Amino acid sequence: MNAPLKPPVIAEILADACVSISNLKANPAAVIAEAQIRQVAILNRNRPVAYVISPGVWEHICDLFADHQLLREAEAALESDEEGVEVSLDDLL
């Protein structure tokens, strides 16, 4: 009986540039400099093992996560049976 064929493993790379771990070890400053311009995937045996991103991109990701958390809290509050507190716009300003 023949063994079933296994499809090749394909890894999606979510970056604009790639570098091997060997090249990262040889010149980490160049990889960090490139990450200021675009996302860099670190590859080990042609598979992504890490990503290097700029501080600005990281801050944007954190902001998106915080906004998502606030949205979930607001949705949960709206779905709860608790009575809301009525306020005017003048009270908020």
Image (cartoon, rainbow, N blue to C red):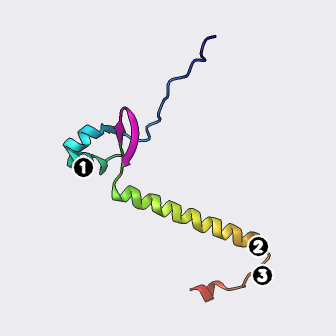
Q: Amino acid at mark 3?
A: Glu
Check disc 1 and report the residue beneath it.
33
Q: Residues within 10 Å of mark 3 (few under 14, many from 20)?
A: few
Q: Amino acid at mark 1?
A: Ala
Question: Going by the picture, which residue comes out furthest to the top?
Answer: 1
Q: Residue at x 39, y 42 (%)?
A: 49
Question: Going by the picture, which residue comes out furthest to the bottom?
Answer: 91
Q: Amino acid at mark 2?
A: Ser
Answer with mark 3 or mark 1, whichever residue precedes in sequence: 1
Work out whether residue 89 or residue 83 is closer to the camera in this orientation and state it.
83
Which quadrant would residue 15 be assigned to in this image? top left
Q: Which residues are magenta?
A: 42-51
Q: Position of residue 52 (x, y in %)?
A: 34, 49
Which quadrant would residue 20 be assigned to in this image? top left
Residue 46 is one of the magenta-drawn residues:
yes
Check disc 2 and report the residue beneath it.
80
Q: Position of residue 39 (x, y in %)?
A: 36, 46
Residue 82 vs 48, above or below: the answer is below
Check disc 3 and report the residue beneath it.
83
Q: Residue at x 51, y 60 (%)?
A: 64
